[in-house]
Amino acid sequence: MNLHLALTHPIFKIISQSAAELGIDAYVIGGFVRDYILERGQHKDIDIVAVGSGIALAKQVAKNIPNRPKVQVFKTYGTAMLKYEDIEIEFVGARKESYTEESRNPIVENGTLEDDQNRRDFTINAMALGLGEANFGTLLDPFDGLKDLEAKIIRTPLDPDITYSDDPLRMMRAIRFASQLKFTIESASLEAISKNKDRIKIITKERIVVELNKILESDVPSIGFLLLEETGLLEYILPELTALKGIDEKEGQRHKDNFYHTLEVVDNIAKNTDDLWLRWAALLHDIGKAPTKKFSKKVGWTFHGHELAGSKMTYRLFKRLKLPLNDKMKFVQKMVFMSSRPIALAQDVTDSAVRRLVFDAGDHVDDLMVLCEADITTKNPKKFKKYHNNFKLVRDKIVEVEERDHIRNFQPPVSGEEIMEAFGLKPSREIGIIKEAIKEAILEGKIPNEHEAAYALMLVEGKRLGLKKNEV
Ligand code: CTP
C-alpha cells in the first residue's frame, strides 16, 4: 500500500533528500502514521527512524532547511530533535534492543527497520512509511498494524511480557490508547499487564501522570480507569480511588459503590468540559468518603466531613504524583471541598444561600455547577429530572443575584482605611469586626452591596463597639 498522500508536507522531501545524501534509509514511524490512517488530523510530532545514525540524519536535515534550525542531541538515547515550523521531529537510529530511561541498558547494536519495529510498543505504532526515492510513501507493516487499527485492537509486536518489561510505562500507554481511541486491549496483553503491574513502580511519576492526564482527557475516561482497576495498576497509582470500591451492608442498609459512581461522574463531566483540572476534580470529588465512612443505626451510612478530608487528600495526592502544587491544585481542592454545597442548596434556593455560594466559589462558581450537575447519577428518571431542574433554578438565581449584588470577587464596599479614618483608629481588631459585620449583612441581604448602606452600618457597628466618630 502506498500512502504518499500522508507525506505532502515539504519536510518529508527534505528528510528524504538528506537521507539520500548520507546514503541511508529513513522512515516515518509511530503516531504520525497511525493518526494519518485513523484520520485523527495532523499528528503534532513526527518520528523518524534512520537505518544508520539518527543524529547524523538530524544534522543533515537541519543543513537542508534554509533557516538552519538548532538540533538538540540526546547522546544517552542516541536521538536528536529539531523543530520545523511548529512540528517537532525526532530522529532515532534503528536498533535491536529498546532503550529507555528506566531500563538502564546500554544502547546495543544498530539494527534493521524490522528490528526496530519489533521493539516498539504496539502493532498500530510500529507501522512505517518509506522515505526513499523508490519507496516514498510505501507502508511497511510487518505486524499487521493496519488490521489491528481496523479491528480496533491494541496488540504488542512481540510477546507482551517482553514488550512490557522493556518499558513498563507501556502498560499505561496501552490503557491510554484504549481509552483515547476506544480500542480493546488484546487478552494476552491484558494478562501480561496484570502480571507485571508492580513493575510500574520503576516508572517516574511524571511519565505516569502524562498518561493519566491523557486518559482523563479522553471522551469516555471510564474506559481507561476501568482497565487500570481491572489490571491492578490503579491500586499502585491512585489507591484513594480503589478505596472507594465496594458496597457495605449493615442492618439492611447499603450505600452506593463510590468508585463506579465516581467514574460515571467523570464520564458525565467529560461531555461538558475539556478542562483537565475540572475533570481531576470530578475524579477526586468523593475520595474523602473512604476515611470518613461511618454507620449508625439511626441514620445509616454517613460520610460526614468527606469534602474537607477529600480536599486535604488532594494535596497529598498531587504531591505524591508530582502534579503541580500551584493554583491548579488549589482549584481542584476547592472544587472537592465545595462539591456538596450546591446540592445542599438546591433543596431550598434562597437568595442569601446563593450569595454565600457565589462569595465562597468566586470565579469558580460555574465550574462548581458543572461538577455538581455531573454528580447526578441517579437511575431514577423522575429524580434525575428533579435534580437537574433544581440546579437550573440555582443557576438562574446565581445570575439574578450576581446582577444585583456583585458578590463574585467581593470587594468590601467600605475599606479598612475608611473605617480607620472614620473612628480615628490605628490598625486594630475592631476594623476586622466591622468589615465582617458588613460582609455578613450583605450576604444575608440585610443591606445592599453599596457604599452608602455599608457606611451607615459601619457607624452603627462602631457605636456598638464603643468607638467614637472622628469629627473632622
Ligand atoms: N514508543 C514505544 N514505547 C514507548 C513510547 C513510544 O515503542 N514507551 C514508540 C511507538 O512506536 C510510538 C513512538 O515511539 O508510536 C512515538 O512515541 P510517542 O511520541 O510517545 O507517542 P505517539 O505514538 O506519537 O502518540 P502520542 O503523541 O499520542 O503520545
Image (spheres, rainbow, N blue to C red):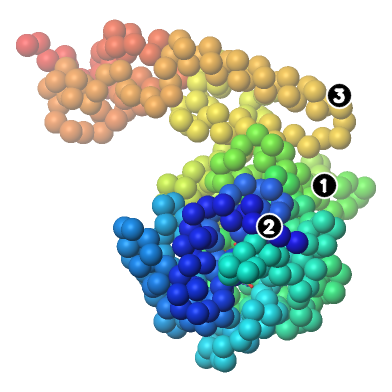
**Front residue of 411 and 309:** 411
Q: Residue at x 31, y 28 (%)?
A: 433
Element at label 1: loop
Q: Nearer the viewer, mark 1 or mark 3?
A: 3
Q: Is residue 449 left or right of residue 183?
A: left
Q: Is residue 430 above or below residue 307?
A: above
Dot in front, 2 or 3: 2
* Pointer 3 residue: 382
Q: Amino acid at mark 1?
A: His
Residue appearing at x 55%, y 66% in the figure: 47
Is disc 3 placed on a helix, strand or loop? helix
Query: Quick check: can you spot residue 249?
Result: yes
Real-space CA distance between mark 2 and mark 3, rounded to the nearest whole angstrom: 53 Å
**Which residue corresponds to mark 1?**
255
Q: Earlier in the sequence, mark 2 or mark 3?
A: 2
Query: Is 327 situated above or below 197?
Result: above
Number of other residues with Cα within 10 Å of mark 3, as a class: few under 14, some 14 to 19, many 20 or more: few
Q: Which residue shows up at 48% across the image and 16% down it?
A: 402
Q: Amino acid at mark 3?
A: Lys
Q: How many marks can you see? A: 3
Quick one: SS at disc 2? loop
Residue tagged by mark 2?
3
- Work out how far the residue at label 1 is from the one at label 3, CA to CA, in angstroms: 20 Å
Horizontal and vertical percent for residue 77?
48, 80
Residue in the image at 58% along x and 15% along y: 397
The first of marks 1 and 3 along the sequence is 1
Residue 404 percent location from the top left of the image: 45, 10
Q: Quarter of the image for the C terminus: give it.
A: top left
Residue 288, visible in the rendered structure: no
User: Counting other residues with Cα less than 10 Å from the Cα at mark 1, is it few (<14), some (14-19), or many (20 or more)?
Assistant: some
Q: Nearer the viewer, residue 78 or 17?
A: 17
Which corner quadrant holds the N terminus? bottom right
